[in-house]
Image: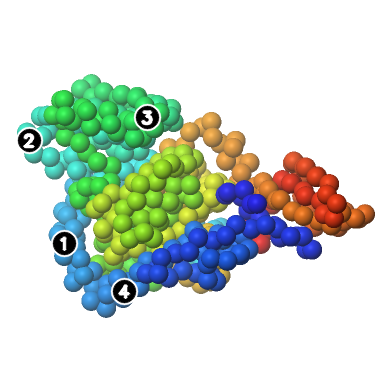
Amino acid sequence: MLAPGRRSLRAVNVSVWSTRCRPLTSSLTHLGPATGGSSSSKDFLTVNSELHIKKAQQQAVSKSGLIQCVPDAFDYLKRILDSKVYDVCKETDLQHAPKMSKRLRNRILLKREDQHPVYSFKLRGAYNRVVKLTTEEKQQGITCCSAGNHAQGIAYSAAKLGISAKIFMPTITPSIKVESVRQFANKESEVVLIGDSYDEAYEACQRCVAEEGRVLVHPFNDPEVIAGQGTIGMEILKQSTGEDIDAVFVCTGGGGLLSGVGLYMKAVRPGIKIIGVEAADAPTMTESLRAGKVVNLPSVGLFADGAAVKRAGDETFRICQWVVDEMITVSTDEICAAIKDAFIDTRVVLEPAGALAVAGLRKYVNRTAAEGKTFVAITSGANMDFDRLRFISERADVSETLLSVQIPERPGAFIEFYNQIFPRNVTEFSYRIGADSACICMSFQAWHQARES
């Protein structure tokens, strides 16, 4: 059986047991062969991790326009245009990535949201929400729960506006983000580390709202937060005047960035594809769009901690149903490779969540064999925990693959099998003898994905 999240290599004359694909709902179209039967691991990745949104909604938006399809789309456009984000944010660069473009045979543009004072796009939505509080709400103070980047945006915004903030963060939050929040916070603000997960920290935040009367600033499920993030889409269109953008790839956690960017771009340029990208072990929006309703994931992986959300927002999901063309999920290895690729062109080390869009773009190009197109990836954050760098640098080039195979129990059979693996380094090996066949469990180092394919 293929280990989850690991790439596979099919060997000649070897029977590799592959996982069965899960069928998609009848209202969704998908890539690749029909699901439900055995498939190669490549088909498993394609069918099970990329999702096309309902065609009827896409066609309606393309034909009639977003404002005609979504009742409050015009209101959102006004919110985006009236956003106050430029009190604290500058217009970030839309940077050409020449090396990545040459390697992928497409024009790649990176929207550098890592250039903000808090090194993340989250400042936009946080400030836009806080600055629009009433005088009474500002006097009550604000609170939020965040694994890092939203918390930094809140701390920065509260200090800028002279507001008291109580910020709850789970104890697993990377130290660099905790220290950054404390650095940005004013004297009236407080950082509380509590709980082993985001959910536990959020419960403490809710108690604070009930007991102290503070205003909760949600990280994504709020119209003003969504509008603040939507200014990124406005900037992309402004900065790319004269260019035909084919698709924009967007990091996705709770959906605030995806819904904001998608809403503005679909209203102004509906022909541009909006593609959300999630970590394979935290596919919150992907599963919600597949189910046609917001779903709660029992657990999520924490490698891309900035986008590790168990439940998408009700409001962000509602918008994403109309504005998102496709969802892509990417593995840890693909994220690490994307961090390296972005570094080569920008000399900036993105955090895992910040590189999701680049990873999704790479995967999309490899899967579709697209050439000569123009793609934009939003690099959403660069609050990298230094202790992770060694792990990321190792996974960026080399990935471990686990195989469970059967070979005939006869002289020379194992050598024939191993010749299909050589010269890759074997990292683990188990051989169980049988009467007619032998069972082998083996893990080995797989080369960079582009070389393997």
> What amino acid is labelled 2 in the image?
Thr
Helix, strand or loop at mark 4: helix
Q: Residue at x 8, y 39 (%)?
A: 134
Mark 4 vs mark 2: give the one in front: 4
Marks 1 and 3, how far apart in space? 35 Å
Q: Position of residue 397 (x, y in %)?
A: 64, 48
Q: Tell me which label, 4 or 1, sits earlier in the chain.
A: 4
Instruction: In the rendered structure, find residue 197 and report the number of the disc placed on it.
Output: none
Q: Residue at x 48, y 55 (%)?
A: 329
> What amino acid is labelled 1 in the image?
Asp
Say above or below: 74 vs 350: below
**Residue 334 vs residue 346, the one in the foreground:** 334
> What amino acid is labelled 3 in the image?
Pro
Disc 4 + disc 2, Cβ < 8 Å: no
Q: Residue at x 17, y 55 (%)?
A: 79
Q: Is residue 37 left or right of residue 132?
A: right
Marks 4 and 3, how far apart in space? 41 Å
Q: Tell me which label, 3 or 2, sits earlier in the chain.
A: 2
Q: Residue at x 48, y 47 (%)?
A: 281
Instruction: In the rendered structure, find residue 170 and report the number of the disc placed on it.
Output: 3
Q: Residue furthest top?
A: 187
Q: Position of residue 177 (x, y in %)?
A: 39, 31
Q: How is the image coloured?
A: rainbow
Q: Position of residue 207 (x, y in %)?
A: 22, 28
Q: Quarter of the image for the C terminus: give it.
A: bottom right
Structural crowding at the residue carrying mark 3, measured as other residues with C-alpha within 10 Å and reported as few (<14), some (14–19) or many (≥20): many
Q: Is residue 443 left or right of residue 166?
A: right
Q: Residue furthest front?
A: 435
**Residue 217 vs residue 280, the one in the foreground:** 280
> What amino acid is labelled 4 in the image?
Ala
Disc 3 + disc 2, Cβ < 8 Å: no
